Amino acid sequence: MGMRRIRIELELPEELFADPGFEGRVVRVAREVAVMDLLRDALISQDKAAEMLGVDRGQLVDIMNARGVPHIGETVEDLGREPKQLSVWKLGAPPNLTRKDYYDPKQ
């Protein structure tokens, strides 16, 4: 399935643009919010969300956590690619351990 680009325009107070990184942050946050909403509604998979955001699965989980998106809705396909992670969960990984600490995409 292909991708289609859309443009969204926002009017924001001029003084916010005094910070040189502001515009880039707004674009990143808007993209994350849109993708997280699609993911929360199960319209896309976690793999597709990671692809759309240009991040790996560990980074995606960090974004999901930051945006309050649960990752209990993973598909069998998603889980099948993460045997190392499943082993850690089975052994009872510490709650402060993030996926990037133990996820090995080569497995």
Image (spheres, rainbow, N blue to C red):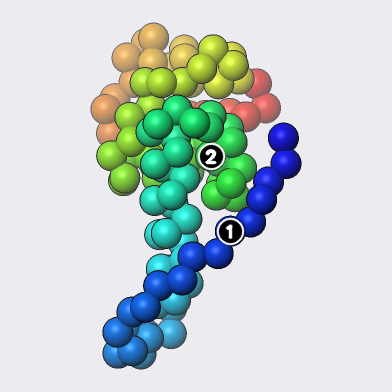
Identify residue type, mark 2.
Answer: Ala
10 Å crowding of disc 2: few (<14), some (14-19), many (20+):
many
Residue 6 - label: 1
Residue under label 2, please give it: 49
10 Å crowding of disc 1: few (<14), some (14-19), many (20+):
few
Give the answer, above or below, for where 6 lies relative to 37.
below
Dot 2 lies on which element?
helix
- Where's the C terminus, which quadrant? top right
Give the answer, above or below, for where 54 lies relative to 10.
above
Where in the figure is residue 81, as x and y percent of width and height?
60, 20
Q: What residue do we see at 41% from left, 68% from top?
A: 26
- Where's the N terminus, which quadrant? top right
Where in the figure is residue 38, as x and y percent of width and height?
45, 38
Residue in the foreground of this view, choosing between 81 and 44: 44
Q: What residue do we see at 68% from left, 46% from top?
A: 3
Earlier sequence position, callout 1 versus callout 2: 1
- Residue 97 in view, yes or no: no
Residue in the foreground of this view, choosing between 74 and 7: 7
Q: What residue do we see at 49% from left, 65% from top?
A: 8
Q: How far apart in space, not on screen, are marks 1 and 2 (Cα)?
A: 16 Å
Dot 1 lies on which element?
loop
Q: Is residue 41 left or right of residue 83?
A: left
Where in the figure is residue 21, as x and y percent of width and height?
43, 78
Give the answer, above or below, for where 89 lies relative to 30.
above
- Residue 76 in view, yes or no: yes
Where in the figure is residue 80, as x and y percent of width and height?
59, 14
In this view, the mark in front (1 or 2): 1
